[in-house]
């Protein structure tokens, strides 16, 4: 019979590519016949072909037992095929592995070639059971006379330790002896195994330090030196004395070695091992940085990457050394390799300080501007390319890595992170940084508007000296028609307009010409923006108008009346488009403004200018008797809007403000506000109650039968016309309570008083229609309904903006014109704890945000607490509302006392008394807090 060999199988596969599955199915059938042969040569050839098919993805688990048979063959070339098939196909759950224990023990005690094959196969198929049973044989193989057997035994022992760690104490002494082996291959294998095992428990390997140090100073094998240095990098944190011992040899290796991999491992070990501290550590650090700086100018991109990666780890301890090569590092940001760019950005972020922040941000920002202006061809260039090349692929311009939105987003976020680090600790000129934020909104062309908005709002709240400049810059942004037109497109940062409008409205006293800004805040194109931005525009317009009219009233001249009337008329006309806005918040704000401005217009139309003789000698007019006139010489409506927004000043809030609020006595934050009770099923009726129910046929004890009322009734009648809620009648398992006539009359009296009080409330809409609800029926108290205000954050949407000239890009950073003071602490609430608990998360450098993400402002509601740095609010023109502190306010209402009226004709026996007592006790339990 002729059998197909492995070579024939491969030739057949190549010749039958069109019908490969059919050929393989036929070959498997042949293998199934051959594998049953008693001839070990044929069986081994069949296993070899099956192993090849297994590499192509075909299952051979059905032949596991035959693989074990070939493993037990006496001839070495057949045994090798069996171990190869086992290493290829056996898994941890293969059932025939239990049959290989004695086979492996036999092979480990046989000839050296059998031992080598068995060790190689065991390292692939070892299981916890095999490792436990074969541990004595593996440890004995460490003392074999042949070096290659000892080396294989060390490597196989590592696989056994991974599967069964309990054998590690048994072989530790033998592994320590192998560090002094006469063969370098055995020593290298032992160091490699120890380098992998040391991560489990480094303290157990500290006794090996003397032998490892000897190998470090005497060996010339770079790969083994790398493993030894890795070992010491893991051991040094657990034995500080190793630092002083290792500094000289590692310094020598860094200075003399030409192997880049060894140099990198030395630098990494110096960093993680704490060897860069002290005077000698500073010398070693300078040596490391000098070596790495040379790689930055190398043509090999791998060397650049390694140098940047190592410098990132050195800069936290020695930033001044890395800063000497700032120009080389910044040049790596322009590298064509995107991975080198990202590592350079990491290094730039780590080395920033107050001295180099402006230079670094200007370089990064100019990098965005450069790619933005040069990467996109003009229309004529694109048309000429399309006409010159017939192939669309040839006309497609090359895309620079800097044009990737992901990279541009990372670069923009890095600029913002550098500026806001440690609450703007590195920013010395906030006027320059505000211009950087606005320029970034123009050139980023990615979704970065929300982050820019947060920082703009945060800066004007924390840095008082920058508010005037910020307002002036925001006015330029609001009056830029191109930015507004492109805001609805992708990547244009419309959130910056939100910040600009909010800043101009909140700090409108810094505006030079507030009247001109109103037309931009209320222009028709604002309705095309997102609803949250349009709502802020309306709010800012109201604040700006209020501040302008109040300032105008202080220096009122009757000649200003036509100008004010024209502004009011124009505002009312512009608000008509906002009133019809589809968003409910914009509608509400526009409607409120429209009502206010309608009132102001009516007041201005009825205003009659006073004769000049009335106020020649003072600010206010006088009557005929020389007393001040109660009527001001300006329209009173000019002061209508400003008091609505000037009660308190917006200040930064301390990070621990919320946690510092003391908990009032008697308040349990973990308790339920409304107690939650599970629906309890009524207890099973006793035999006595069942008996009472049976007596209903005779007309006695009919109270039990009253519980079986129809579910369709809205109320349950109990007793003499007494009424309770249906929910109580259906949801309570206990007997239903009864309201007495006096209590019902008192409740009705309180309800009528509340309705009479609400009639005088102009904000409450009364229903004059007659009520169809009976007088005696309980009506839910509407005052108990909670009112919740939901302030959601604005959605994120960006738009593409053109590239203007960026004022923030100066040739050389100029010193700031003034010294800016940053409010980093923020204000604390009234009655704050002296030592507030630490925050749950965060670094303690950011504050709670007005926008809801930890980076902004809020109203100063606790200015009377005497906290330093908190400005006192201006006195209000309105009478404060004082609460009567002496009025008692019980925290828990008294339980309602319920008495049960006895029906006429009912017997007053003992059972009735027991039922009444049971009702009273159940009511008391339900009313208890």
Image (cartoon, grey):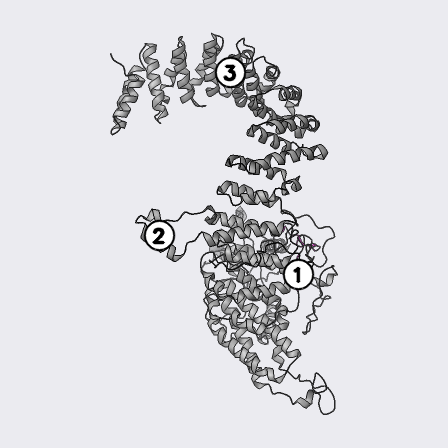
Residue 859 shows up from this direction? no
Q: CA distance from mark 3 to mark 1?
A: 71 Å
| Range drawn in magenta | 646-671
Residue under numbered circle 2: 385
> Residue 599: image x %, image y %?
56, 79
State whether residue 613 is above or below residue 270: below
Q: Is residue 189 above or below residue 286?
A: above
Q: Residue 703: x and y, percent?
A: 52, 57
Residue annotated with mark 1: 651
Magenta segment, principal secondary structure? loop
Whether residue 226 is visible here, answered yes or no, is: yes
**Of pointers 2 and 3, the one earlier in the residue sequence:** 3
Residue at 72%, 57% (x, y): give it: 831
- SS under mark 1: strand
Quarter residue 142 falls in: top right
Q: Is residue 529 rendered magenta in the image? A: no
The numbered mark, 3 or 1, whose residue comes first in the sequence reads 3
From the top left corner, tell me how far across and down residue 364 is, in percent. Answer: 55, 50
Q: Residues within 10 Å of mark 2 (few under 14, many from 20)?
A: some
């Amino acid at each position: 019979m002729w059998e197909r060999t492995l070579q024939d199988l491969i030739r057949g596969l190549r010749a039958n590519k069109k019908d490969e599955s059919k050929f393989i199915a036929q070959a498997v059938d042949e293998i199934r016949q051959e594998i049953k042969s008693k001839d070990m040569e044929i069986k081994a050839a069949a296993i070899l072909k099956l192993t090849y098919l297994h590499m192509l993805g075909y299952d051979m688990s059905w032949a596991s037992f035959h693989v074990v048979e070939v493993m037990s063959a006496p001839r070495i070339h057949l045994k090798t095929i069996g171990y190869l098939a086992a290493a290829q196909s056996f898994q941890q759950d293969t059932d025939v592995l239990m049959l290989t224990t004695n086979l492996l023990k036999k092979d480990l005690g046989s000839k050296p070639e059998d031992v080598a094959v068995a060790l190689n196969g065991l390292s692939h198929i070892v299981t916890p059971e095999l490792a436990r049973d074969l541990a004595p044989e593996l440890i004995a193989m460490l003392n074999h006379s042949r070096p290659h057997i000892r080396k294989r035994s060390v490597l196989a022992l590592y696989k056994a330790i991974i599967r069964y760690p309990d054998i590690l104490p048994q072989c530790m002494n033998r592994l320590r002896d192998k560090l002094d082996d006469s063969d370098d291959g055995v020593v290298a294998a032992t160091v490699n195994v120890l380098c992998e095992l040391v991560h489990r428990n480094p303290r157990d390997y500290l006794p090996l330090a003397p032998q490892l140090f000897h190998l470090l100073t005497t060996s010339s094998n770079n790969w083994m030196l790398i493993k030894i240095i890795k070992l010491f990098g893991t051991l040094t944190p657990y034995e500080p004395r190793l630092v002083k011992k290792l500094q000289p040899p590692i310094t020598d290796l860094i200075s003399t070695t030409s192997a880049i991999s060894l140099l990198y491992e030395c630098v990494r070990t110096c960093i993680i091992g704490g060897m860069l501290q002290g005077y000698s550590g500073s010398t070693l650090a300078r040596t490391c940085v000098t070596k790495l700086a040379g790689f930055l100018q190398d043509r090999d991109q791998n060397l650049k990457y390694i140098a940047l990666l190592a410098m990132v780890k050195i800069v936290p301890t020695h930033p001044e050394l890395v800063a000497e090569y700032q120009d080389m590092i910044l040049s790596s940001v322009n590298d064509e390799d995107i991975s080198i760019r990202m590592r350079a950005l990491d290094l730039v972020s780590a080395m920033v300080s107050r001295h180099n922040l402006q230079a670094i941000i200007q370089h990064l920002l100019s990098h965005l501007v450069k790619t933005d202006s040069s990467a996109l061809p003009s229309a004529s260039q694109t048309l000429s390319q399309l006409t010159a090349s017939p192939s669309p692929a040839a006309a497609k311009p090359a895309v620079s890595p800097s044009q990737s939105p992901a990279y541009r987003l990372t670069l923009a976020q890095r600029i913002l992170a550098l500026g806001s680090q440690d609450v703007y600790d590195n920013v010395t000129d906030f006027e320059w940084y505000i211009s950087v934020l606005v320029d970034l909104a123009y050139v980023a062309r990615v979704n970065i508007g929300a982050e820019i908005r947060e920082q703009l709002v945060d800066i004007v709240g924390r840095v008082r000296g920058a508010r005037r400049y910020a307002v002036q810059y925001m006015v330029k942004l609001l009056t830029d028609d191109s930015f507004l037109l492109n805001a609805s497109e992708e990547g244009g940062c419309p959130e910056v307009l939100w910040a600009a409008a909010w800043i101009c409205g909140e700090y409108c006293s810094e505006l030079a010409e507030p009247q001109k800004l109103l037309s931009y805040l209320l222009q028709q194109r604002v309705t095309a923006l997102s609803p949250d931005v349009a709502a802020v525009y309306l709010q800012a317009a109201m604040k700006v108008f209020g501040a302008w009219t109040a300032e105008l009233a202080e220096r009122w001249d009757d000649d200003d009346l036509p100008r004010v009337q024209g502004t009011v008329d124009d505002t009312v006309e512009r608000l008509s488009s906002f009133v019809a806005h589809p968003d409910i918040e914009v509608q509400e704000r526009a409607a409120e403004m429209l009502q206010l401005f309608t009132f102001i217009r009516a007041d201005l139309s009825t205003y009659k200018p006073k004769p000049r003789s009335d106020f020649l000698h003072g600010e206010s007019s006088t009557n005929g008797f020389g007393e001040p006139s109660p009527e001001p010489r300006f329209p009173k409506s000019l002061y209508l809007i400003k008091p609505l927004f000037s009660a308190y000043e917006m200040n930064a809030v301390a990070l621990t403000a919320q946690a510092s609020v003391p908990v009032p006595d008697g308040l349990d934050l973990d308790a339920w506000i409304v107690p939650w009770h599970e629906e309890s099923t009524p207890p099973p009726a006793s035999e006595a109650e069942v008996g009472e129910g049976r007596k209903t046929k005779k007309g006695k004890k009919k109270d039990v039968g009253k519980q079986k009322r129809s579910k369709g009734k809205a109320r349950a009648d109990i007793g003499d016309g007494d009424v309770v809620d249906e929910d109580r009648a259906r949801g309570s398992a206990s007997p239903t309570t009864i309201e007495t006539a006096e209590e019902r009359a008192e409740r009705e009296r309180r309800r009528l008083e509340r309705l009479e009080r609400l009639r005088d409330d102009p904000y409450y809409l009364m229903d004059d229609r007659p009520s169809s609800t009976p007088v005696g029926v309980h009506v839910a108290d509407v005052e108990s309904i909670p009112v919740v205000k939901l302030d959601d954050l604005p959605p994120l949407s960006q738009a593409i903006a053109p590239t203007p000239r960026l004022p923030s890009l100066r040739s050389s950073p100029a010193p700031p014109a003034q010294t800016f003071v940053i409010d980093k602490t923020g204000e604390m609430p009234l009655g704050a704890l002296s030592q507030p608990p630490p925050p749950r998360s965060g670094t303690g450098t950011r504050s709670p945000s007005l926008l809801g993400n930890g980076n902004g402002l809020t109203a100063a509601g606790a200015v009377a607490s005497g906290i330093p740095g908190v400005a006192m609010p201006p006195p209000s023109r309105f009478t404060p509302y004082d609460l009567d502190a002496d009025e008692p306010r019980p925290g828990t209402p008294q339980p309602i006392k319920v008495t049960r009226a006895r029906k006429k004709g009912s017997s007053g026996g003992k059972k009735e008394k027991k039922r009444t007592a049971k009702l009273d006790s159940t009511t008391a339990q339900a009313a208890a807090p």
